[in-house]
Amino acid sequence: MDSKFLRAKHLTITPKASLMLAEFLGNDLSKIANELTKLELVVGADKEVTPEIIEENIGISKDFNNFELQKALGHLDHKKAYQIVNYFSQNSKQHPFVFTISILYMYFTKLMKLHTVADKNPGTVAKALGVNPYFVNEYIAVSRNFPMKRISGVLNTLRTYDTKSKGVGANLSPRDLYNELIFNILK
């Protein structure tokens, strides 16, 4: 989120809330401006926008989104990952498979890049990965569950399921695509 725009609205936003908005609204600046104006009216001046405020006022689930799916996969939380993709498959218009694949591809690419960063200083890691320093410790913790070889396998799996989602070699429902994808990432 653009900090100048937020300051003009007298708002601050948590990193997670910012990611939720970016994931849900994409890069459509008019949608982002409209939602931030709406939040300004609801929250009031000099308040911080949190994931809970976004969930209540914009309708984005703070528990069932790609950010939480990344976190569940990173921490090898099978139950949570399957809950999220079950929700995604039931709401496939709001959570297109191809979008989730691209988010996960970026996530695992950043994890791969983390393994190549010699200096694990949070500032250095944040810059190398292109993430907010707030998330660096999370990436470092997850990298222990995903060595480079495993990440290579995950990236290959993501490419395979991207192809399958487009009807090449398989004609699976969104539910089956999501379930197979998660199974193959967590195996």
Image (cartoon, rainbow, N blue to C red):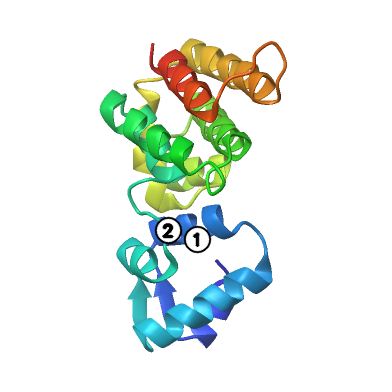
Residue 148 % position (x, y):
50, 15
Residue 1 % position (x, y):
55, 66
Name the side, left or right, on which 175 lies relative to 75. right
The circle drawn on residue 53 is none
SS at mark 2 in the image: loop
> What residue is shown at x 58% (from left), y 40% (from top)?
96
Amino acid type shown at disc 2? Ile
Amino acid type shown at disc 1? Leu
Asked if residue 141 shows in the view, the reply is no
Name the one closer to the observer, 119 or 182. Answer: 182
For the residues labelled 2 and 1, say whether their Cβ atoms are less than 8 Å apart: yes
The quadrant in which residue 157 appears is top right
SS at mark 1 in the image: helix
Does label 2 or label 1 sit earlier along the sequence?
A: 1
> What residue is shown at x 41% (from left), y 19% (from top)?
146
Above or below, comparing residue 56 to residue 63 in the picture: below
The residue identified by callout 2 is 60
Above or below, comparing residue 11 to residue 58 in the picture: below
The residue identified by callout 1 is 21
